[in-house]
Image (cartoon, helix red, strand yellow):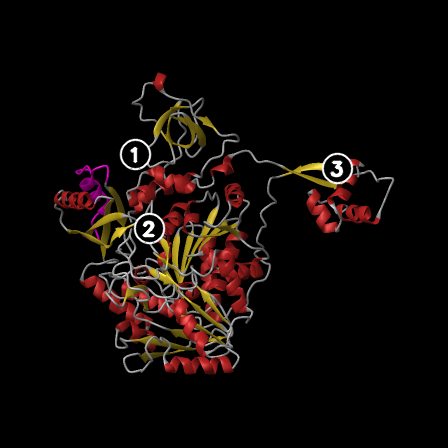
Amino acid sequence: MDDAALKPHAAEEQGARAGILLPLPLSGAYDYRLAAPLPRGTLVAAPLGPREALGVVWGEAEGAVPQARLKDANPLAGAPALPATLCDFIDWVARYTLNPPGAVLALALRARQAFEPEAPRIAFARGTKTPTRMTAARQRVLALASDGLARSVAALADEANVTPQVVRGLIEADALDETLLPEHPPQPVPDAQFAPATLNPEQERAADALRAEVAAEHFSATLLDGVTGSGKTETYFEAVAAALAAGKQALILLPEIALTVQFLDRFAERFGCRPAEWHSDLSQKERRRIYRAIMRGEARVVVGARSALFLPFHELGLVIVDEEHEQAYKQEDGVIYHARDMAVVRARLENCAIVLASATPSLETWVNAKAGRYRWLRLPRRHGQATMPEIRLIDMRAVRAEPGTFISQPLRDALAQTLAGGEQAMLFLNRRGYAPLTLCEACGHKMVCRDCSAWLVEHRYQKRLACHHCGLTMPTPLQCPHCQAEKTLIACGPGVERVAEEFATAFPDARLAIASSDTMQGPLETQAAIRAMAKRETDVLIGTQIVAKGHHFPQLTLVGVIDADLGGSGGDLRVRERTFQLLHQVSGRAGRAEKPGLVLIQTRNPDDVVMQALAGGDRDAFLEQECTARERISAPPFGRLAAIILSSADGEKVREAGRALAKAAPAARGVKIWGPTPAFYQLLRGRSRERLLVQAERNVDVQTYLRAWLDRVKLPGAVRMAVDVDPVSFF
């Protein structure tokens, strides 16, 4: 990343004309007329055709439109404004990802109702008059209201255990006075001194270093590298406390916030209240409330998913990216960006500290730390008396198993011993549903999605087949749609539901729960399952990657990985890294308290470097080997990649467009073009897809090259193009 490109623009006052950026995928700002100059970032109402759109003062007008033809843009009530650093960040992301700045601006304006006038709440407090007729119910209400707090009718009735009619009678008797409150109660403020954790010496040294980075109030990037269970969260909480003490806001990014109920509980234990949350499961009302609180500085700590990067912080003093290696930080649709990388950019523009935390750092972050570009803090051992679990490989080539079974005998024996000892276990399989493939044993026909080049996954509990890419579902047919034979469709391979069925047959008295996005409808059900496991209401949790992320179950001593070879290859240069990270993380759920943990990994390739690194506990040797392999082929982080994905409902048109685009590629030193070739999923959501890959040396300005190339070709209207700078997957 070019340091010069990260320098903020000066916020200049505009004249009677101004460039207004609209949150639409347009090429740039439009010229409008203002009654008076407004600073960059001011939100305005701007006419756009027959409607009025929300816009932002972005810069000087281009001056091409005659003054008489300009339309008037008016500031919103109260003249709310996006911070100048957020405007600079939006420009930077647009340039880096090759997206229109208006499309990136839309990410920052996802709560447009937050700019509308608030609707005050009517509440009542104790007045000066006392009614002539008193009852026990009325006395309870007045005693409650005597604390001086204003409450709604419903709240008074509920807290005093009376009917709303009793409260209304007191209002009519002038014993309760009406008052107006803000639309939402104030955001609770975390207390930096509420309940500091007791840290071990390694944690304390790391916490001191993080406190110093926050206090310096300048940009710095730190890798907090700690083994699973080492207390990374408690350590970086001390950096959050330092930011709060300095009067700064803090942003904590999590890969999937809806699944992290334990994190939110731990935050409340440390700081006395929960942080503000920002993620896609918020209601519009909650989204509006949190956005306002952040813009006003009332929300001091925000925990959010990747979209929280675009929130209007005015006093940001710390950014934390937890589990920084997670692929969930990559936004694959619309504006394609990597939240971890963009978080580093936002921290630099805000001139504040950023902490990247992980037990299995991404190769990019690890190389930056090793080269000294990031500070490197290590937590090499687990907190308290806990030790790292023992990891054993089960060679499935040598273990005999009955057809249709997937839990090996060594794993069954370990499960029996764990359950007999009153402890908990986890079975991991990163495959949803009952079976990944349904085929006809008579003619060999495979059940494939009509809109995607992907198998339909059987969900036996729901008696349906589903595509996990486009969402298509259909009832499981009674006969083969190809040969019409009846009762010939069979399930091939295991999903978590099939493993659960096998486990329940072998251990009928054990309490089990399935954790996958199919079996848990929304975050509330997921959080309930996690709490049930923490309370020991569940003996065995069988799940997908949901169970691998940051959960702490003190009585969980056994983890079984059903099929460790699912990662495959498929030409994905990061497949070994991701497989190692995922299996290392899920292994880390075992033995996090006093009792030792055991991890059994079923594999048909025990000699693979990933399996050997896991069994030997030698993460750094694996990363060194990955570095050597990547550097040899100039792959990231030792080279640059960018993908161009073309799609169309017309397969021939998209293939023609791919060939035309490849022919127009300019020759440049240090740049190679691969493709076009059909994408891994050649058909996705009814659209044919072609991919081209740009591979460049590290010092090549890929964005400039891509702009020069793409400006040469005009694609047919039926063909869509998406550009993915720094791709992490190749589907």
Would you say residue 212 is visible in this rendering?
yes
Label 3 CA crowd tier, 10 Å (few <14, some 14–19, many 20+): some
Q: Which mark is residue 664?
A: none
Q: Mark 2 falls on what kind of element?
A: loop
Per the rendering, the mark at residue 332 is 2
198 left or right, relative to 366: right
Residue 679 image position (x, y, % from top left)? 22, 53
Up-down: is 51 above or below 478? above
| Label 2 vs label 3, nearer the camera | 2
620 vs 351, left or right, is left
Secondary structure state at the residue bearing disc 1? loop
Residue type at mark 1 is Ser
- Residue 326 is situated, as x and y percent measured from the top left of the image, at 37, 59
The structure residue drawn at horizontal position 52% and vertical position 69%, both measured from the top left corner, is 533
Residue positioned most to the top: 68
The residue positioned 19% from the left and 40% from the top of the image is: 708
The answer to whether the residue labelled 2 contacts the one labelled 3, judged by CB atoms less than 8 Å apart, is no
Q: Would you say residue 558 is visible in this rendering?
A: no
Q: Which residue is mark 1?
A: 27
Say what amino acid the circle numbered 2 marks: Glu
Q: Earlier in the sequence, mark 2 or mark 3?
A: 3
Which residue is rendered at x = 21% and y = 62% of the image?
631
Q: Earlier in the sequence, mark 2 or mark 1?
A: 1
Q: Quadrant of residue 69?
A: top left
Query: Which residue is denoted by mark 3 in the rendering?
Result: 177
Range of magenta residues: 696-718
**Which element is circle 3 on?**
strand
Tell me the amino acid under the disc marked 3: Asp
| Quadrant showing the C terminus | bottom left
**Mark nearer the viewer, 2 or 1:** 2
> How far separated are the C-alphas under marks 3 and 1?
55 Å
